Image (tube, grey):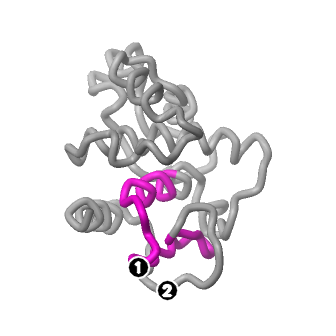
Amino acid sequence: MEHHTSLILSFLRDIGISYSLEEIEGETFLPGLKLRTGTLIIDRGKLLYPGDILHEAGHLACMPPDIRKNMSDNLPGGDLHDGGELMAIAWSYAACIYLNIDAKVVFHEHGYKNGSDAIIENFKASRFIAVPLLQWLGMTYDEKQAQIHELPPYPAMQKWLCTERPG
C-alpha cells in the first residue's frame, strides 16, 4: 500500500495537483480523503485504498481551473460534476496505465458499487467511457483524432490537467 501511495503522490506533485497530508476530522465520502478549495486532503492514517487518491485527483484534474480552485468537501450534483465522475474514472484508469499499476488499485472490490470488475473489463476491451469528454477538454484523443494529430490515443493523455474552460 505504501509503495502505491508514494508513487501516486509523486505523480500528483509532478502534474500539479495540489494535496496536503493532514488529519481529517469527521466522516468523509471516501475514508481519509476530502477536497478543500482545490486541494486534495489526505489523512494517511484513515486512508484505506491508495487508488482512491487517484480517483479523487481525477475529479480535480478534469475541471477547469476556475472550478477546481473552489472544489471542497462532497461534490454537488448536476451535469458538470456527474460528467466529472465519468471523467475521473477514465482519467484514473489512464493514470494506472501511465504509472504501470494494476487497475485494481483504483477499481478495488470495495468501490464503484460492486462494478469495479466490469469497469476494468470494459477498459481492457477498449470500451472506454468519458473519452469524448476528456477530448473536449483537450486532455486526450480518441482513435480517429489521434491519427489526425499523429499522437497516441486514450489511454495516453496529452494533458493531465484541464487548463481552460471549453468553449
> Per the image, is 37 magenta?
yes
The amino acid on which the numbered mark 1 sits, given as a three-letter code, is: Gly
Q: Which residue occupies the foreground of this view, 49 or 128?
A: 49
Seen at 43% across and 21% down, the residue is: 122
Q: Name the front one of labels 2 and 1.
A: 1
Picture coordinates of residue 14, whole percent (x, y): 29, 64
SS at mark 1? loop
Tell me if 38 is positioned left or right of 52 in this view.
Answer: right
Q: What is the distance, in whole Å, between disc 2 and disc 1 at their CAs?
A: 8 Å
**Residue at the disc numbered 1:** 45
Q: Residue 23 got which mark?
A: 2
Q: How many C-alpha atoms fall within 10 Å of the one at disc 2: few (<14), some, or many (≥20)?
A: some
Picture coordinates of residue 51, whole percent (x, y): 38, 54
User: Which quadrant of the figure has residue 112?
Assistant: top right
Callout 2–callout 1 Cβ contact below 8 Å: yes
> Per the image, is 150 magenta?
no
User: What's the magenta region?
Assistant: 32-58
Tell me if 29 is positioned left or right of 6 in this view.
Answer: right
